[in-house]
Image: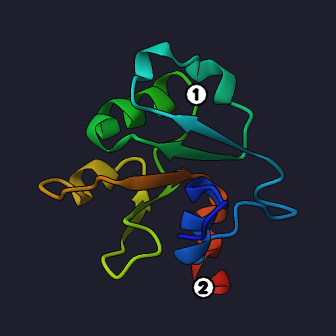
Amino acid sequence: MVPGISSALAGPLFAGISLTDKELSRHFVVMSCHDPDILDWTAFAGIDTLVLLMGARQLSDIVQRLQAQSGRRHDTPVVIIKSAGTANEKVWEGTLSGIVEDTRNESLSPCIIVVGEVVKLRTKVG
């Protein structure tokens, strides 16, 4: 990581994801998902890209809330970046419908979760 730069910004960049794009991600929100119960998930419905911190242990709950309360489609792209910017960095890319199963039995913490169409640009950026 880079001193003074938030992991919410640097982590996705290390994984080849720019959080903004003139067509796919005009805006993004960063949130802590340590306690998903305190978030107003309906407020995120119109946000192009979501950056979720501290959500590893709550991944299944987060995915369910994104679909049921934020209106995200099951095929919405998602990426999970573990230990971003380190030699131990690991990245899982998928969709909301499959990411929980894709990462089952994996230790995800610490991680940054990026949700939105901008994830599709990962190979073009990185």
Q: Going by the image, does 3 lie left or right of 99? A: right
Q: Going by the image, does 60 lie left or right of 112? A: left
Say what amino acid the circle numbered 1 marks: Ser
Q: Can residue 98 be seen here?
A: no
Q: Answer with mark 1 or mark 2, whichever residue precedes in sequence.
A: 1
Say what amino acid the circle numbered 2 marks: Gly
Disc 2 crowd rating (10 Å Cα; few below 14, some 14-19, many 20+) is few
Q: Where, by quadrant of the figure, is residue 103 drawn?
A: bottom left
Q: Going by the image, does 88 lie left or right of 55? A: left
Q: Residue furthest front?
A: 3
Q: Where, by quadrant of the figure, is residue 42 drawn?
A: top right
Residue identifier under label 2: 126
Please state the horizontal and vertical placement of residue 4, each as a whole percent of the image: 66, 60
Q: Can residue 55 be seen here?
A: yes
Residue identifier under label 1: 70
Identified at 67% across, 82% down, the residue is 125
Q: Is residue 76 above or below residue 14?
A: above
**Mark 1, mark 2: which one is toward the viewer?**
2
Q: Is residue 88 above or below residue 69?
A: below
User: Quick one: quadrant of the C terminus?
Assistant: bottom right
Label 1 with label 2: CB-CB less than 8 Å:
no
Q: Is residue 2 above or below residue 30?
A: below
Q: Nearer the viewer, residue 97 or 6?
A: 6
Q: Helix, strand or loop at disc 1? A: loop
Identified at 34% across, 82% down, the residue is 87
Residue 119 tag number = none
Q: Residue furthest right?
A: 22
Please state the horizontal and vertical placement of residue 88, each as a whole percent of the image: 30, 76
Q: Nearer the viewer, residue 96 or 1?
A: 1
3D distance between C-alphas at marks 1 and 2: 29 Å
Q: Helix, strand or loop at disc 2? A: loop
